[in-house]
Image (tube, rainbow, N blue to C red):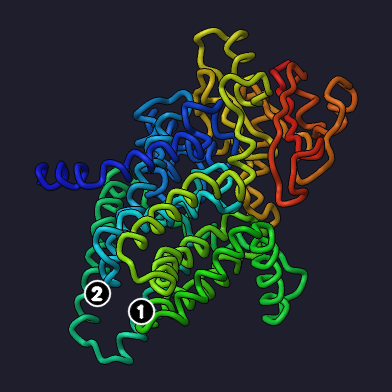
Amino acid sequence: MLVGIKNRIKNNWVVLVILLLGSFLFISASPLYKGNPWVDTNAMLAIGQAWLDGRVPFRDIFEQRGPVLYVYYLVMNLFSTKGYIGLFIIETLNLIGIWYWEKKTLQLLQVPSKLQKWLALILPFFLLSSFSFENGGSPEEFAFFWMKYSLVGAWFIFILVYLLITLKNRYWIEILVKVVSFLLGFLSVTLPLMVYYQFVKGVPALIKVYFVTNIGAYTQDSGETGLRQHLYLIVQAINKNFMAQPIVLVVLTVGVVIAIFYRKEKQAAILVVLTMIFSSLLSYWSLRQDSYMFLVSVGISGILLPLAIWDFIVQISTESKIRTKLVIAVAVIMTFAIPPMANKFIRYAIPVSSSQNFAAQDLGRYISKQSGKKASTIIYANMLSLGIERFTNVKYKYYFFETTNLNPQRFPQQRQSLNYLIEHQKADYVVWGLNWGNRPPIDLKNKAAVISQVSPIVTRHYKLVKVGTEMMPGIDPPFLTPANQNQYALFARK
């Protein structure tokens, strides 16, 4: 086995070096940058850190994403509970895994063996090019079993469409083999997970949060109950996120068209397109507008890109050497040129050498200065974790420590618990997102203006000690403006 791995590395070392170089340049958790400012990613890092400290997700600390995702984030924290090196390592390994999987796919589709490794480079960096990738670290980036409730749709549709195509062609043995393989794969993940949660007496909490709470409280209210209105809002969300990434849109459209019309065997292309369409519909069924939810659809459709590029090159040249040079040139260009052009989050990542503010680092250093080596407790009163705990010592004592994206009318326990903790001054510090919810930035030097943005529940029991800000791209406008500031206030117990 070790010999086989060694030979694979030897045969693909140039491509692997390119993958590593691309990771260093285009992943915000890279040592080249100050860190990943995305609150979703920092929330999951916090859960992984809490689990490492002995607090079992769902049973002892609340977050509604899937347990396998927290296994990933537990492993990240094994590398280090400070900074983002663990996240960077796992994201890099995930990109290598995507490259290897795409290479195997191209092999099945009879692309010449010497070109497979180069063409397969296109998919992982196409994902990085998508605005939906954001700063990286989302469940959609890894897209494995038990990672996020909304990912169930993509897996279900892919399997359903695949089975329909194989049934049409009467591939009975293949159907049986694939069904058994899928079930074995699913059970190999699910059984150890259930054994662990049974051992720690966490199964009821897992079921209650991951299934009951997500089904009941994650979907946003549409204002209408009709199916027609619901579908209209879903299509509107998909269109908004697709149009926000024009380079990806153009490349994807051209790739899909080529793959469908230039391929003699069209079933693979049809399978991918149908899966992309229906997984998009199911991903946005909750009526949330979040761009990262579209990443799965981008990834699914992106499978066709290397295939399309090869089919196109075949049409324009019959010379083997020219084809090889063209494939390598296209792969390298798409690896290094398109991600920073297409994904604003990559373009505006903050280098470690920059004097530009990085809010989590600034607030974390303030807490360290006040508390020394003593572990502090933090509550994120109206937002997900900012990641302050990556820069100072934090202890997780409470079931709710942040405000997740659940509907407060359908899940009032979260708000009630956080308010209780704040009113009784249980936490050392409270963090408040000042312009959370797309509100305009304010003058942070004006203390009265800052206080006016914060709930009286916080200001009655905590005093303002520090403010933090950082620039964060959004869907609009296309370039950073003062409106792109994320602003935060740190409060200490009175």
Inter-mark Cα distance, 2 to 1: 10 Å
Name the image quarter holding the C terminus.
top right
- List x then y, in percent, for residue 462: 74, 21
Q: Residue at x 83, y 24 (%)?
A: 444
Crowding around mark 1 (Cα neighbors within 10 Å: few <14, some 14 to 19, many 20+) is: many
Residue toward you, 80 or 21: 21
Place residue 352 in its image quadrant: top right
- List x then y, in percent, for residue 177: 19, 76
Q: Which mark is residue 178?
A: 2
Place residue 356 in its image quadrant: top right
Q: In the picture shown, does residue 321 fall above or below 405?
A: below
Pointer 2 and pointer 1: residues touching (CB < 8 Å)? yes
Place residue 315 in its image quadrant: bottom left
Left or right: 16 with respect to 181? Answer: right
Residue 252 showing in the rendered view: yes
Crowding around mark 2 (Cα neighbors within 10 Å: few <14, some 14 to 19, many 20+) is: some
Query: The residue under label 1 is which amino acid type?
Result: Tyr
Residue 209 showing in the rendered view: no
Query: The residue under label 2 is which amino acid type?
Result: Lys
| Label 2 or label 1, whichever comes before in sequence order | 1
For label 1, the residue is 162
Left or right: 398 with respect to 491? Answer: left
Q: Residue at x 47, y 26 (%)?
A: 31
Q: Residue at x 34, y 47 (%)?
A: 96
Q: Secondary structure at mark 1?
A: helix
Q: In the picture shown, does residue 196 fall above or below 369?
A: below
Residue toward you, 436 or 350: 350
